[in-house]
Image: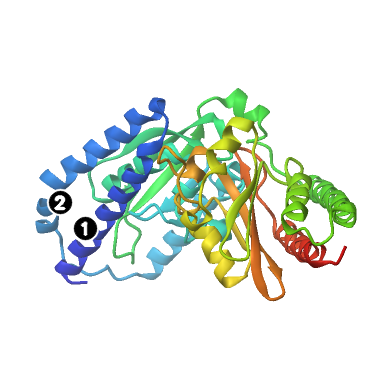
């Protein structure tokens, strides 16, 4: 790759990190020092190191691989996968290249799902910018780093992340080896971090979730049969009450035939609900896209903090609510979208599954029938 291309990639990566730092300005005051440290670090990098680092780049190609080297690679790969600590291999943008078995158990994310996605998606919003900055610094060859982060699914358990640079043979760029260790072993054990899920437990968990989903479907059917026939807003409001708490921490309903308006907000508290009651659906890209495409959307660890707009204080809604997964479905009446239902799950609650997304899509069609039925 030409030197100018290398430099362009590095500059583009820096711009992306700056954008993430801007989005992190809305975190709580207790987390601001971490964000400010990351911002100062990035300023030092662009002022003192970006161009000198470019000058020191080497244009040498990857070394040739011998049979002995391949055997060594197989051995190292086996050691990596069987290493007892959670280990991830990421690139300079913190995108996961590999995840070992211990890491999949620790994070609750399968290696196939994590590969190709940013590791920062597993972290609390306040820690993402700092982690990306440190990973980029390690990839640039500025030495090993360590920092304390928190997983979005278990924000009460601090995790020590150690980052070191490695250069696998045949790779054009330096990658970063990340070792994750729970800061409070007793807390992590009580949270089930070190447990290896068995097939029996997994099956029991799935059966329990399926039974709970069937209960929600049954209650939704009963509610729609007794709701005011043909009253779209009333039907959607009653349906939202069924979903709130049992299926989601937040349920937000937007309805209207001539442009959507916010009609229902059910949140963990009345104070939180008031923050979104006055929000215009037109400022929520996710709602706008769902209404335009008439297609449901499922997101786990939403990558875009501004996907549901900002609250009255200018903070991203998804960050402030600590949303870990969301569902957004249209309510289609006579071929036109006359409503959008959005569901949030927050904190350590399990992410929405494909089965739950399918069930909600089915319920949205039943809501449409009840909304258009003749009294």
Does any portion of residue 123 appear in the rendered image?
no
Q: Left or right: 87 with respect to 277?
A: left
Label 1: which residue? 11
The colour scheme is rainbow
Does any portion of residue 327 appear in the rendered image?
yes
Q: Left or right: 316 with respect to 326?
A: left
Q: Nearer the viewer, residue 194 or 149?
A: 149
Q: Quadrant of the C terminus?
A: bottom right
* Residue 220 at x, y percent in the picture: 84, 53
* Residue 239 at x, y percent in the picture: 77, 51
Say above or below: 63 vs 210: below
Label 2: which residue? 50
- For the residues bearing labels 1 and 2, Cβ distance under 8 angstroms: yes
Query: Which label lies toward us, 1 or 2?
Result: 1
* Residue 270 at x, y percent in the picture: 63, 32
Q: Nearer the viewer, residue 327 or 267?
A: 267
Mark 1 or mark 2: which comes first in sequence? 1
Q: Left or right: 54 with respect to 240?
A: left
Say above or below: 277 vs 367: above
């Amino acid at each position: 790759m030409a030197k100018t291309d290398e430099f362009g990639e590095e500059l583009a990566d820096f711009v992306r990190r700056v954008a993430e730092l801007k989005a992190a300005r809305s975190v709580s005051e207790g987390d601001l020092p971490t964000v400010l440290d990351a911002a100062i670090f990035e300023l030092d990098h662009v002022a003192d190191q970006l161009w000198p680092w470019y000058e020191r780049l080497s244009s040498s190609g990857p070394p040739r691989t011998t049979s002995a080297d391949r055997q060594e690679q197989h051995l190292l790969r086996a050691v990596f996968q069987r290493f007892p600590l959670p280990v991830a291999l990421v690139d300079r943008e913190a995108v996961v290249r590999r995840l070992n078995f211990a890491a999949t158990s620790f994070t609750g994310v399968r290696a196939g799902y994590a590969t190709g996605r940013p590791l920062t998606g597993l972290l609390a919003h306040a820690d993402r910018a700092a982690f990306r900055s440190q990973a980029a610094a390690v990839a640039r060859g500025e030495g090993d780093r360590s920092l304390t982060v928190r997983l979005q699914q278990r924000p009460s358990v601090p995790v020590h992340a150690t980052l070191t640079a490695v250069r696998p043979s045949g790779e054009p760029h330096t990658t970063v080896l990340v070792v994750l260790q729970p800061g409070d072993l007793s807390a992590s054990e009580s949270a089930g971090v070190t447990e290896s899920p068995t097939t029996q437990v997994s099956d029991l968990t799935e059966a329990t979730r399926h039974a709970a989903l069937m209960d929600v479907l049954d209650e939704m059917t009963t509610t729609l049969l007794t709701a005011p026939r043909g009253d779209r807003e009333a039907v959607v409001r009653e349906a939202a009450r069924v979903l709130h708490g049992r299926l989601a921490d937040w349920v937000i309903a937007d309805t209207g035939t001539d442009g959507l308006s916010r009609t229902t907000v059910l949140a963990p508290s009345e104070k939180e609900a008031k923050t979104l009651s006055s929000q215009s659906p037109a400022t929520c890209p996710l709602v706008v896209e769902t209404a335009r495409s008439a297609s449901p959307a499922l997101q786990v660890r939403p990558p875009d903090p501004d996907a549901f707009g900002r609250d009255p204080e200018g903070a991203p809604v998804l960050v402030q609510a600590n949303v870990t997964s969301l569902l957004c479905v249209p309510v289609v009446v006579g071929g036109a979208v006359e409503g959008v239902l959005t569901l949030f799950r927050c904190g350590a609650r399990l992410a929405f599954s494909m089965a739950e997304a399918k069930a909600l899509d089915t319920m949205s069609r039943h809501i449409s029938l009840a909304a258009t039925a003749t009294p």
